[in-house]
Image: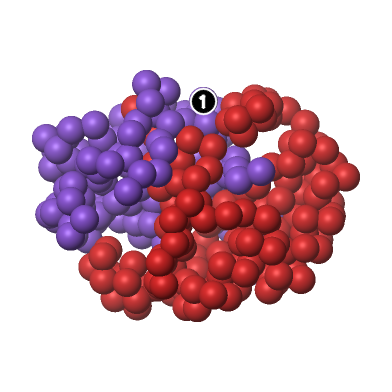
Chain colours: A purple, B red
Amino acid sequence: MQQISLITLGVADAARSRRFYAEGFGWTPVFEMEDIAFYQMNGLVFGTWLKKNLEDDMRRPNPAPYGAYALAHNVRTKAEVDPLIARLVKAGGQLLRPADEPPHGGYRGYVADPDGHAWEIAWNTAWTISPEGHVTFKL
Amino acid sequence: MQQISLITLGVADAARSRRFYAEGFGWTPVFEMEDIAFYQMNGLVFGTWLKKNLEDDMRRPNPAPYGAYALAHNVRTKAEVDPLIARLVKAGGQLLRPADEPPHGGYRGYVADPDGHAWEIAWNTAWTISPEGHVTFKL
């Protein structure tokens, strides 16, 4: 089955990360402890976990704080992209790329979370978003 | 909306990565070009993109190949965990942690893909998986 259940990001400071996702994206954890927060997403779970604990669980000591990958959050209208990027930066994010129009159309920019994990904020004219937030690939 | 549309991993060698996801997980791309592959997942899209192109798009030069984060693929029975980990390693993955039982129950191990991106392969007794593969957080 083509299925992803969980995305877990390692974070250095749980409160700083919590603030970014709460005040930037406006998300509320479904479960929270001192070192970990889980958010119920569209058919999968998103988590933030103290980097050291994630490293121990993966049996992988000292990976880089972030790497060559990006998560994307799509919005339903072009007008939502810039204000969301501004809110994310205000909540402790780092602007990587101000929004502009990619060659294939739409509108997108990139922000890194306080630990450097990259988020693309995109309005994609081709990919439909269901009322539940499920996204279907289309050209 | 608590929503993730897309996860994109930067890869050094598209064919090597394609083999890992095709032969290891058994996944088929919904779209493929020389530098990029997209897989339709459970309400979101998973992509692999040549690292250099992803870096250019993010405006972030030379991030580490991988970092402190993990994706998880949950299976429906405990008996599926070990054979899937074995297939992933055979398809070019690196075993990080052989499967064992975490303190909260269930059964899980970790494998890195050929670029180092970590995958947890888990049987989780608490989180339900719908027929469409959607996962709901539960304690």
Look at 77% across and 49% down and name the residue there.
B108
Q: Where residue A59 appears, x then y in whole percent?
A: 70, 64
* Secondary structure state at the residue bearing disc 1: loop
**Numbered-mark total:** 1
Q: Is residue A27 above or below residue B40?
A: above
Q: Quadrant of residue A56?
A: bottom right
Q: Is residue B26 above or below residue B92?
A: above
Check disc 1: other Cα within 10 Å, few if <14, some if 14-19, many if 20+. Answer: some
What is the residue that sits farthest to the right in this orientation? B79
> In the rendered image, is residue A62 in sight?
no
Residue pointed to by mark 1: A30
Look at 18% across and 47% down and name the residue there.
A106
**Front residue (pair B67, B80):** B80
Look at 29% across and 51% down and name the residue there.
A120
What is the chain letter for disc 1?
A
Q: Where residue A90 appears, x then y in whole percent?
A: 19, 43
Q: Quadrant of residue A58?
A: bottom right
Q: Is residue B43 above or below residue B68?
A: above
